[in-house]
Amino acid sequence: METLALYEKYLREISKLNSAVALLVWDQRTYIPKGGHEARAEVVGKLSTMAFEMAISDELGGYLEALEGQDGLSEAQRASVRVVGKQYRRTKAIPPALFEQYVIDRSKSEAAWEEAKENGDFALFEPHLTKMVDYAKKFAEYYGYEDCAYDALVDEFEPGMTCRELKTIIEPLREKLVPLLRRLTEDGTAPDNRLLAGSFPLDKQRELSLRALRTMNYDFNHGRMDDTVHPFTIGIAPGDVRVTNRFIETMPLSGLMGAMHEGGHALYDLGMPAEIQYLGLGNGASFGFHESQSRMWENMVGRSLPFWKMFRREVVDVFPQLSSATAEDLYRAVNVVKPSLIRVEADEVTYNLHIMVRFELEQALFDGSLAVADLPEAWNSTMEEYLGVRPASNAEGVLQDVHWSGGMFGYFPSYMLGNLYAAQLFAAIRRDIPDLDSRIAGGDTKPLLDWTRDKIHLVGQIYEPADLIRKVTDEPLSPSYFLDYIEAKYFPMYGL
Ligand code: ZN
């Protein structure tokens, strides 16, 4: 077992470097003074390169080769060899000179995107995006795939997922969701959310978010919440997982929902034992699974009536101007469905449609049926088809998301899968905890956390997402749970 001990020690050294990088990045995005950015970027670059070199070294390759197929490994150790080995081979597959050029072109592309978005001018971004698509196509060839090139890209975020399987999930979902949305907006009566109009002091909003995180049993001995521009959760090390948040004076509950979202991510990371994390299994089963934990707390809990029965008194305590609002009023006010142009502001009914637009276009870019130059028009007409709204400018259309500028193709489906996993998991949780609603309404969310901890968090990345969802819910992933959840919630609320 000599090799195993050396392998584990080696992974632990990599994770120490990554931990230092995470802390520096957290500081970059929260408290660093403006003048510190330039020098900090150099330090982050240096440490990241050291971690990267360790992750593709011949030494690690040697350990992996010796351990693959070796008897006597635990389930977690075998998973580690599989996951670390896969990443190792993917990274090694790309010729270093090509990767170096890609990193340079990627930062140019990100800068061009920022400028293009500011000016709503797609032409500024087009040549860079073309390059990013070409790189991704080349990388897919090096990674290898069976069916479509897109599979090799999705695999990075959602191990084992394929474009064929995504289509079998997306098509039936879209066929139901598009008419469902039309019915809600045309025949239904939208809830009244005027009570949330006005100005709400930021420090009070911050206080409310802290209370929500405590309600979720997020442990402030193992984390903290700080202000930032684009909220994120970051694991510094086992036992130190931090959330960040942002508050807008005229949107009193937007920070609260953000806190619950990021809190869900943080609970996942905090629930993974250190020994799992040190084996390189600390990222969760997939990006989609990670998103399922955040969406579950944000939507299935934070936008539910039982939650508002419990949380109303906190809201009124912090904002006395809302004292005439009932739990039902607040519940309704946070559940208005409105097709909009911007994904990150979308409600839970329309959110998946935004993802489908991106999936459709990514597919077309990678199977060669769509040229980058035709992307803006394709974007606008697909938005109109699925959501019934058409962007007036590219800034609120094809240029709104940062992902493509950094060459991240195949990432968007994870957001949708997160919603679908969340609905399927929540249905299973309800079966196992029949009094869940009354527990939450009474302020006790612990049974929910314990369930997810036990079945999902503890195992980290030991199982691939398709295996984990089947193991935990006795079924493969199915969009029907999400549709049932949406219908059961929104038809009565909209008087249908
Ligand atoms: Zn998230």
Image (cartoon, helix red, strand yellow):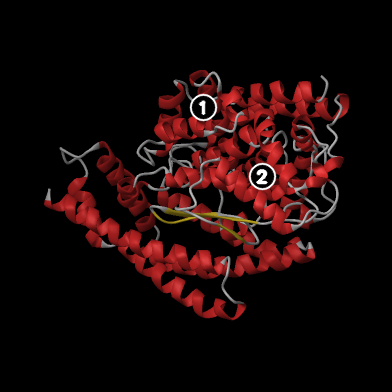
Q: Which structural element holds mark 2?
A: helix
Res 231 → quadrant: bottom right
The answer to whether residue 38 is left or right of residue 239 is: right
- Amino acid type assigned to the residue bearing label 2 in the image: Met
Q: Secondary structure at mark 1?
A: loop
The residue lying at 39 percent from left, 62 percent from top is 18
Q: Is residue 309 visible?
A: yes
Image position of 180 with respect to 345: above or below: above
Could you tell me how many numbered marks the image carries? 2
The spot of residue 214 in percent (x, y) is 56, 45
Q: Which residue does the image show at 28% across and 56% down from the upper left?
A: 11
List the residue tagged with mark 2: 257
Quick check: 100 above or below 458?
below
**Distance Cα–Cα, label 1 vs label 2:** 26 Å
Closer-to-camera residue (122/246): 246
- The amino acid type found where label 1 is placed reads Leu
Q: Quadrant of residue 97?
A: bottom left
**Residue at (78, 56) in percent of width and height:** 249
